[in-house]
Image (cartoon, grey):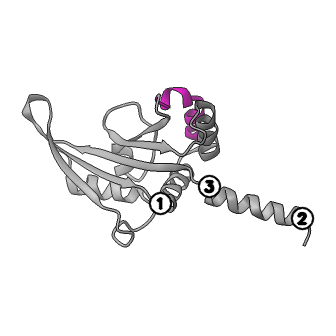
Amino acid sequence: MSNLFICLCFFIILEITLKKANLIRITVFCKDGDSCDQVKHALVRLVPFDVGKEKVPVTEKTATGFEEKKIRIIEIVLVKDRHCNAFLESIRQLLSDAQRTLIINQIETRLDDDLDFFLRLEKDSWLRNEIRISDSGNCFHVKVSLASFPKKREVARELVRGIFG
């Protein structure tokens, strides 16, 4: 085998197994008028593996919103590298080219000072099996703690470009 072939195989394996995130938190709010079972099912569908078999908990909390209305907060937290990478690859494939370009163009506003990356996915669209980036609050909130090393903004930007580019 040639050295070039071996190097090429190494880089392909490295790209596939590269740690992209330390943790991913996916949260959705279920308000009065929402079918919480349907919303919970939609949240679970965002994850490209069986959360039960993989022992990834789906947690629920209750909070009080405006005018003392009860809100259910449903959340999935991904911590294993293979779960995080599978989720990011799945979202990448579900998004259109235009939406991936939008994410790349908005990298600066989607990265906070801790180099966490944020996405909002329209809740109503995903309930209809369509995925769209959103700016509204009626959404699935995705917080990605990027595995950027060294922990610098430029490294985080390149990691996001690599995920969604």
Q: Is residue 77 left or right of residue 109?
A: left
Q: Which mark is residue 83?
A: 1
Q: Quadrant location of the C terminus? A: top right
Query: Is residue 97 visible in the rendered structure shown here?
Result: no
Q: Nearer the viewer, mark 1 or mark 3?
A: 3
x, y percent for residue 156: 58, 37
The residue tagged with tag 1: helix, strand or loop? helix
The residue tagged with tag 2: helix, strand or loop? helix
Residue 47 inside the magenta-drawn segment? no
Amino acid under disc 3: Leu
Q: Are marks 2 and 3 in contact (CB under 8 Å)?
A: no
Query: Is residue 28 visible in the rendered structure shown here?
Result: yes
Residue 110 inside the magenta-drawn segment? yes
The residue tagged with tag 3: helix, strand or loop? loop
x, y percent for residue 19: 57, 53
State the extent of the magenta-drawn residues as a range. Answer: 97-112
Q: Is residue 15 left or right of residue 141?
A: right
Q: Which mark is residue 133?
A: none
Amino acid under disc 1: His
**Mark 1 to mark 2: distance in Å?**
32 Å
Q: Which mark is residue 3?
A: 2
Residue at 64% over, 38% down: 158
